[in-house]
Amino acid sequence: MNLKENFSKKKNLLTKKENLYFVFLAIIIFILDRLTKNKIIDDLNDSTYFFNNFINFDLIWNTGIGFGLMSSDSSIIYSSTTILIGLIILILSYVFLSFETLDKFIFSIIIGGAFGNFYDRIFYNAVPDFIDLHYNDLHWFTFNVADIFVSLGLIAFIVRDFFVKR
């Protein structure tokens, strides 16, 4: 099969009604992430909003990957990581259309969240994280809505591997 036939086949997969639902789900997740981040960036700035003893909104700018891992001041590491993340999103976006329905759902959640954080890496050179879960002085990593969806998608992917027979 040549490249033109392969591209035509993927294009037909994209326009299938079922696949459009999953693309739409990824877009909804991306929009939800953008709305929450824009609200926090516009309203919170350098202050902290206290909800209760377990959750705060506290804006931090993350240059690493999920949950602040691999944070670095090096522009080479940041750029390399951003390019790698972009390639992974492109590959997932390309192949997820040919998966089974459950896998399409899982990957659309991951892609929607990943694209939200990728957008921030490109336009802000960092990802705004703001959800601070804690108990007394014990704090979890600060995260955002996109991180929630990527994490839920990865957990669902792992659970599916354990419990769904192929």
Image: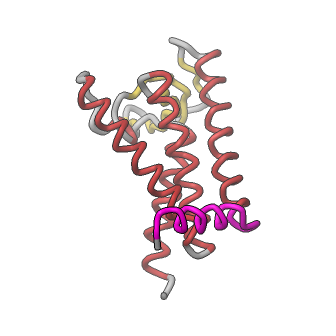
Q: In this rendering, is residue 158 above or below 43?
A: below
Q: Say whether residue 13 is magenta.
A: yes
Quadrant position of residue 38: top right
Relative depth, front residue between 8 and 43: 8
Q: Say whether residue 96 is magenta.
A: no
Where are the magenta residues, as a range? 2-19
The residue that appears at 55% across and 62% down in the rendered structure is 7
The residue that appears at 58% across and 19% down in the rendered structure is 41
Could you tell me residue 116's position as x and y percent?
55, 38
The residue that appears at 62% across and 37% down in the rendered structure is 33
Relative depth, front residue between 120 and 11: 11
33 on left or right of 96: right
74 on left or right of 51: left
Could you tell me residue 150's position as x and y percent?
50, 51
The residue that appears at 54% across and 68% down in the rendered structure is 5
Quadrant position of residue 77: top left
Relative depth, front residue between 86 and 110: 86
Could you tell me residue 49's position as x and y percent?
59, 21
Q: Residue furthest right?
A: 17
